[in-house]
Amino acid sequence: MKTFTLLQLADALTTWFGIRYCGAHEANPFVAKLVTHDPILGLVIVKLVAFALFAIAWYKAARVLSKVNRFYMALVLWNVVCIGIQVIR
C-alpha cells in the first residue's frame, strides 16, 4: 500500500509539474479531458479512481498490485525523463 501511495503521489506531482511548467500534454485521453480545465482537480479525481481500483485489486488479488506498481513506476520514470528533456532545452 505504501509503494502504491508513493507512486500515485509521484505520478500526480510529475504530471502536474510537466503540464504546468514544461508545456507537457497528458497522453491518456480520459485524464487529458479532466486536466484540461483544472489540472489539480482532474488529477485528484484520477487518483481517487486509482485508489478505488487499488482497493478492489487488493481485496481480489495481491499479485495484481505488484504489476500495477511496476506500471506506475515506469510511468513516473517516463514523466521524469520528459521533464528532464524539457528542462535541458
Image: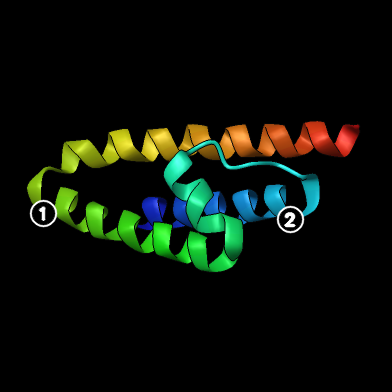
Disc 2 target residue: 20
Quarter of the picture containing the N terminus is bottom left
The location of residue 7, given as percent across then percent down, is: 47, 49
Image quarter of residue 52 = bottom left
Kindly identify the residue that appears in the image at 50 percent across and 32 percent down: 74
Q: Position of residue 24 (x, y in %)?
A: 70, 42
Alpha-carbon neighbours of circle 2 within 10 Å: few (<14), some, or many (≥20)? few
> Which residue is depicted at the point 52% across and 47% down?
32
Q: Earlier in the sequence, mark 2 or mark 1?
A: 2
Asked whether, in this view, residue 61 is left or right of residue 18, the answer is: left
The total of numbered circles placed on residues is 2
Spatial distance from mark 2 to mark 1, Cα to Cα?
Answer: 36 Å
Label 1 neighbour load within 10 Å: few <14, some 14-19, many 20+: few
Query: How far from the left and from the top, in percent, is residue 19?
Result: 69, 50
Would you name the residue on which mark 1 appears? 59
Out of 29 and 71, give the one closest to the viewer: 29
Q: Amino acid at mark 2?
A: Arg
Question: For this rendering, which residue is in front, 65 or 86?
Answer: 86
- Quarter the C terminus occupies: top right
Coordinates of residue 82 in the picture (x, y in percent): 70, 33
Give residue 86's quadrant in the image. Answer: top right
Instruction: Check disc 2 and report its element: helix, strand or loop.
Output: helix
Q: Nearer the viewer, residue 27 or 68?
A: 27
Residue found farthest to the right: 89
Amino acid type at circle 1 is: Tyr
Q: Residue at x 39, y 33 (%)?
A: 70
Say left or right for 41 vs 82: left
**1 or 28: nearer the eye?**
28
Q: Check if mark 2's residue and mark 1's residue have beta carbons within 8 Å.
A: no
Element assignment for label 1 = helix
Above or below, comparing residue 84 to residue 19 in the picture? above
